[in-house]
Amino acid sequence: MSKDSPALLTVRDAAERLGVTPRTLKYYEERGLVAPTRSEGRYRLYDEEDLKRFGRILRLRSLGFSLHSITEMLKQPLEPVDGRQRYSVESLRQIHDAIAQQVDALDARIESMRRELKEAQKLRAELSPDLDYLQRRLAGENADALLEQRRSARAKAGGTPLARRGKTPDDAAPGESS
């Protein structure tokens, strides 16, 4: 290595210098936050820019920012503001907008999952009496007595939509008649 080329650190040396584990550095690479160069033997090699980027990531994590937010922040350059490196107001707006879009997408996904959960719970409630009936039949209980219990329970609950319209549903389980 010549004197003009920057010093490259192995994952172990970089982790030691940053005060983290090598696994932490590999994790951030897996998340796409850092892309170290590779040696001919495919070993990770980190330069000073990689270490600065890791330093930013670690500082932001210590402040409680999520990896999604950090990813958006890393897309924006730091700029000199009052003698320190900060995000400009425009950069902050772009970070805000990107994170707000992610939150909106997650809210829509949550609402969709809630609807799906509600449908699954409704279907489960509809299937539970059928499962109970079949378990009891397999245990040897009398089919006619079980069907009468189902009719009584349905009548107490206000009947089925068909019964409210004056129609009689087929109360028998598949393959059985009443």
Image (spheres, rainbow, N blue to C red):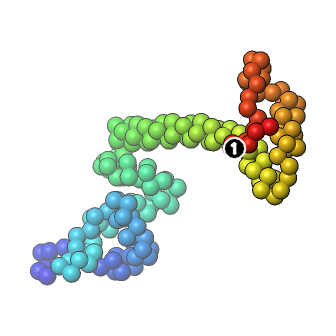
Give the residue displayed 27% in from the left and 68% down from the top: 36
Q: Residue furthest top?
A: 165
Query: Residue 162, position in %: x, y?
Result: 73, 23
Residue with the mark numbered 1:
175
Q: Left or right of 103: which side holds 11?
A: left
Q: Left or right of 16: which side holds 166?
A: right
State the quadrant of the C terminus: top right
Query: Residue 135, position in %: x, y?
Result: 77, 54
Query: Residue 158, position in %: x, y?
Result: 83, 26
Give the residue displayed 68% in from the left and 38% down from the top: 122
Secondary structure state at the residue bearing disc 1: loop
Q: Residues within 10 Å of mark 1 (few under 14, many from 20)?
A: few
Up the image or down, 102 lies above or below 32; here it is above
Q: Quadrant of residue 14?
A: bottom left
Q: Amino acid at mark 1?
A: Gly
Query: Residue 103, position in %: x, y?
Result: 49, 40
- Front in this rendered view, residue 18 or 34: 34
Q: Is residue 153 visible?
A: no
Give the residue displayed 43% in from the left and 51% down from the top: 68
Q: Left or right of 141: which side holds 81?
A: left
Q: Left or right of 161: which side holds 146?
A: right
Up the image or down, 44 lies above or below 67; here it is below
Q: Is residue 2 visible?
A: yes
